[in-house]
Amino acid sequence: MKKIFLMAIAAAFTLASCDGQLDSANYTAANTSNYPASAGDLNKELSALYGVMNQMSTNPLETPWFVGYIMSDDANGAGGTGDVESHAIGHLMTNKESLYDNAWHNTYVGIARANAIIYAVDAFDWTGQEATRNQLLGEAYFMRGLFYLWGVQFWGDIPAYWEAAAPDPCPQQSAEDVIMPHILADFTSAANLMSHGATTKGDGHATKGAAEGYLARAYMFYEGFYKKAGELANASLADVAFDFTQEGAGTSLSKAQVVSFLEDAINNGGYSLVEDFRLLWQYTNELTAPTYSFVADLAAQNKYWAGNGNTEEMFQVQYMNSNSWNGTIGMGFCNQVELYTGLRCDDDGAGHTNGGPETYPFGQGWGQGTINANLWDDWPSSDPRKKATILDVSSELSAYYFTTSCSEDAGYYNKKWICITAPESDGTGGSHYPWWGVWRWKNTSTEAPNGNSFQGDHFSDMVLLRLADVMLMHSELTGTATYMNRVQARAGVPQTGYSWANIKNERRWELAGEGLRFNDLRRWSGKGGGANCEAAVALQRQEGSRVNYTGTWTKMSHGKGVGGSSWAQRYADTDGFLPKPPAQISIVNNPEVLSQNKGWYDDTKWSMSGTPVY
């Protein structure tokens, strides 16, 4: 099994700067006065930089991928009746001041670590190793751009700096005018400094192709959301000026350059579409597929899961067999999204729980992030990706039961992320454990440090960028259908000509359940779109969608029981931004340095004081 327990993370290292405001305290004895002491130390810093994504993973409800997924129109917060955090996120509200504290903290830890590498790299002699130096520097630029992009998409105008250490105070900057151009420059520098083949694809490091793909993602969000460009293929887009000097960035960025970068990633990056769409998802693993009827045809041909780091993955969060509930990062070493999106598993009082042999091959979990019924209803049944993406419990799992604690459960689960079981024991007795635990028991002598296979044996990559997405971005930017048609051909659906409607639909179907939909809607709507923009209208369609609440079928309602108004109004109030942590606002205590986003902690209906009751 390829890369099953990889991604060892070096000891935590960060800079102490603006400790209270940016929450990036020094957690080790290493600091800028004694570290890095050699060029080799920079690789340790780089590992620690990637490790911030594992720190983020300790709580999926503070990660860009899971939060963005739940906030979209295609997913419900769901979980149990007491899971107010996930409900609040799904209703574009909040239930406690600390909800995003760790997300803020980890964003600035990542930025500080990236800056530490960028400003230390030329303290050493790289004669004869210039390519190594450029790759390392390119990866640091990539990661800085990534953390700033996540920060901007979460909170908009945030404190920002591009020096070795943050100024004190470190005031928030305009995301549109200042931070986004820097993000685009970071990805441009990364793409120009790195070389194809400089690292092994899928080993957890950023690549030149990943930088080119993320450059396009950031550029399209900038032009669509901030510049309100509308249909990008036909928009007249001014070059983005870089009024600062940065290695590898140049002085500006044009749409033509972004398209050229995408074409380079597609044609020269060494990536390829996986043969069958189903092979991207772990339910086709070799322990499960032979007895899972939905993919039995693949197993009969000895075709199994393409695996972590497959030819289509371009960037991902990786995990390893070191998870534990002890410590601040322990559970960040397993993909908890698989646990969070598992079948709601409360006992029915008669010893029956979802996630066992009766609901094979789908494992138990918290039942959060269920698929909204509208996605199932909107998706043409002729598209094979529909059933490859969505688990319809009514047709696939006759033994599934809606628990007495379930909330916002429409009976649809995300197959791309859900825990998958194997039809045998992991060696501890019983059966139908997560397939990762069974694989480990059959192939290694390694124990589960978590001590609980159900909670800890989840090691599939969290895929953040794959080639199909890059191909669809190319079609959307150019108004051409060539690469969209390749994605459609792989899916086995009719190939269509380019139109804005077609590319929007294709992104929704191909990338459903991968955490991209919410920011796609935002960029198609433009900042300040109000309650009638595309994003607001799409979100409002959740009102009245069918859900099961504590075993009874009913309809979702935004305002009922939680004091809210509507999804459309919440989007209009906030533009899709989250609240900046109130603790940070209080520490700074100066609105000219850090101010709260509109729609939060004001006279709008932002607080979910109770649990949705339907």
Image: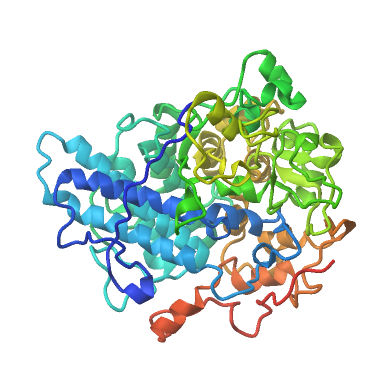
| Colour setup of the view | rainbow
- Using the image, determine if residue 443 lies above or below residue 235: above
Is residue 281 in view from this perspective? no
Location of residue 183 (image quadrant): bottom left
Q: Is residue 425 left or right of residue 565?
A: left
- Using the image, determine if residue 61 lies above or below residue 207: below
Which one is nearer the viewer's eye here, 588 or 32?
A: 32
Q: Is residue 203 left or right of residue 290?
A: left
Which one is nearer the viewer's eye here, 323 or 519?
A: 323
- Using the image, determine if residue 404 lies above or below residue 137: below
- The residue positioned 58% from the left and 59% from the top of the image is 61
Residue 83 appears at what percent x and percent y?
Answer: 69, 63
- The residue positioned 75% from the left and 49% from the top of the image is 345
Which one is nearer the viewer's eye here, 476 or 158?
A: 158
Is residue 441 in view from this perspective? yes
- Using the image, determine if residue 87 lies above or below residue 379: below
Location of residue 483 (image quadrant): top right
Residue 51 appears at what percent x and percent y?
Answer: 39, 50
Q: Is residue 463 left or right of residue 356?
A: left
Residue 241 appears at what percent x and percent y?
Answer: 34, 58
Residue 568 appears at what percent x and percent y?
Answer: 71, 67
- In the rendered image, the residue lying farthest to the front is 429
Which one is nearer the viewer's eye here, 66 or 509?
A: 66
> Which quadrant is home to the C terminus?
bottom right
- The residue positioned 78% from the left and 73% from the top of the image is 559
Q: Is residue 263 left or right of residue 563?
A: left
- The residue positioned 44% from the left and 77% from the top of the image is 584
Q: How many marks?
A: 0
